[in-house]
């Protein structure tokens, strides 16, 4: 009996030793594989960055490193730069941190630090900063499948002295989501507590949200990229574009819209307004030079809704001309 017990114990010990050896070997192979993949990824990114410097569009990543062992792998940069020599656009950003799970390398999450500056010749400059910006993306060999960006504490200013423009902006929170939907592209975005400053004139704080499907645009986030001349030649279904002043005063647009090759907008939109009087007064106060037009439009909206302060009316846009009911009320310049 004792001999049998010792034999059983010896067998268990051997199995434990073999298991431990297998674990050590597997760990060593995994560690070697991770560092091999990290080295390959760093070399590949370095090569792509170097190659981009020879083309019309280039990118830079200072102090490039690959980190995340043992369960993640990602690219880190102390600063990020982008140059498009054809369009005259260049941009600089703060530190980039990215990571993907080893078992799911096509799904990456990222954080990007500010400040950022985007410059477009001859004198357009966009300066931005934020408290937190993080993003996620799912990609395949032919490009992105979907991506999301969210940020807190956004603030910045766009200046174009030659055009007499200076626009300041701030938002407590914002999000943007894009995804392929067959051949179309779904885009959703929102801004909470958006504050705009137009040349020193502060506009009312708004909550803004948009949800749109752009026809035949899935390729925009693939390796082929967006076509030149956007937004010309595009058509979309605007599910919702809402502006919310708070206090129940909200304006929502929905319906099909298109931009022709000349940049002229056409569409057939439903406009729902809660608080026609509040919108009329607020816009007239901020833009007194447009007060007469705003009051006229508000009067037409109330007239079409039987005098109610909440209205749903049809807005038709024909090659840039905005028609409310039977009355032309404005003009959208070519985009």
Image: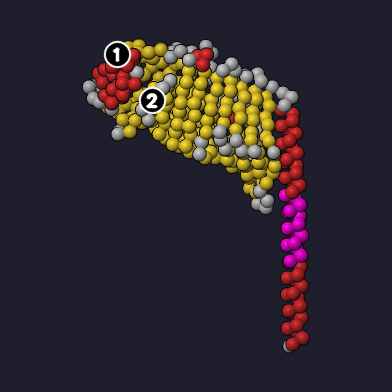
255 vs 50, left or right, is left
Q: Quadrant of residue 210?
A: top left
Secondary structure under tag 1 reads helix
Q: Is residue 183 visible?
A: no
Secondary structure under tag 2 reads strand
Which residue matches tag 2? Answer: 202
Q: Which residues are magenta?
A: 20-34
Separation (CA) of disc 1 from disc 2? 21 Å
Residue occupying the far bottom of the picture: 1
The residue closer to the viewer here, 10 or 50, is 50
Q: Residue at x 42, y 25 (%)?
A: 197
Would you say residue 22 sits in the magenta stretch?
yes
Could you say where residue 65 lies in the image, as x and y percent from the top left? 70, 42
Mark whose residue sits in front, 1 or 2 = 2
Label disc, if present, on residue 292 of the rendered structure: 1
Q: Residue at x 35, y 24 (%)?
A: 271
Q: Is residue 140 above or below residue 10?
A: above
Q: Is residue 124 visible?
A: yes
Label disc, if present, on residue 87 of the rendered structure: none
Could you say where residue 116 lies in the image, as x and y percent from the top left? 57, 31
Q: Main secondary structure of the magenta part?
A: helix
- Answer few, some or many: residues within 10 Å of disc 1's Cα (few below 14, many 20 plus, some between 14 and 19): few
């Amino acid at each position: 009996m004792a001999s049998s017990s010792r034999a059983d114990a010896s067998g268990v010990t051997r199995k434990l030793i073999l298991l431990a050896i297998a674990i050590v070997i597997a760990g060593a192979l995994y560690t070697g594989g991770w560092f091999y993949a990290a080295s390959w990824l760093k070399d590949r990114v370095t090569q792509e960055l170097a190659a981009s410097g020879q083309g019309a569009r280039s990118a830079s990543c200072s102090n490039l490193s690959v980190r995340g062992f043992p369960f993640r792998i990602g690219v880190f940069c102390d600063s990020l730069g982008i140059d498009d020599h054809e369009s005259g656009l260049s941009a600089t950003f703060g530190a980039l941190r990215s990571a993907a799970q080893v078992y799911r390398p096509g799904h990456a999450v990222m954080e990007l630090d500010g400040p950022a500056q985007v410059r477009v010749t001859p004198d357009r400059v966009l300066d931005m900063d934020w408290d937190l910006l993080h993003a996620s993306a799912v990609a395949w060999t032919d490009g992105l499948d979907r991506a999301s960006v969210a940020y807190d504490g956004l603030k910045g200013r766009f200046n174009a002295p030659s055009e007499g423009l200076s626009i300041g902006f701030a938002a407590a929170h914002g999000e943007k989501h894009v995804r392929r939907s067959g051949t179309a592209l779904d885009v959703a975005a929102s801004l909470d507590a958006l504050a705009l400053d137009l040349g020193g004139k502060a506009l009312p704080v708004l909550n803004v949200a948009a949800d749109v499907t752009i026809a035949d645009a899935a390729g925009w986030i693939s390796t082929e990229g967006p076509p030149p001349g956007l937004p010309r030649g595009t058509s979309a279904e605007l599910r919702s574009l809402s502006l919310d002043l708070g206090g129940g005063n909200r304006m929502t647009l929905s319906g099909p819209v298109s931009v022709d090759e000349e940049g002229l907008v056409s569409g057939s939109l439903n406009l729902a307004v809660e608080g026609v009087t509040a919108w009329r007064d607020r816009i007239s106060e901020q833009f007194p030079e447009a007060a007469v037009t705003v009051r006229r439009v508000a009067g037409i909206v109330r007239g079409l809704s039987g005098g109610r302060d909440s209205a749903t009316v049809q807005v038709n846009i024909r090659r840039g001309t905005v028609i409310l009911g039977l009355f032309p009320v404005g003009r959208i310049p070519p985009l």
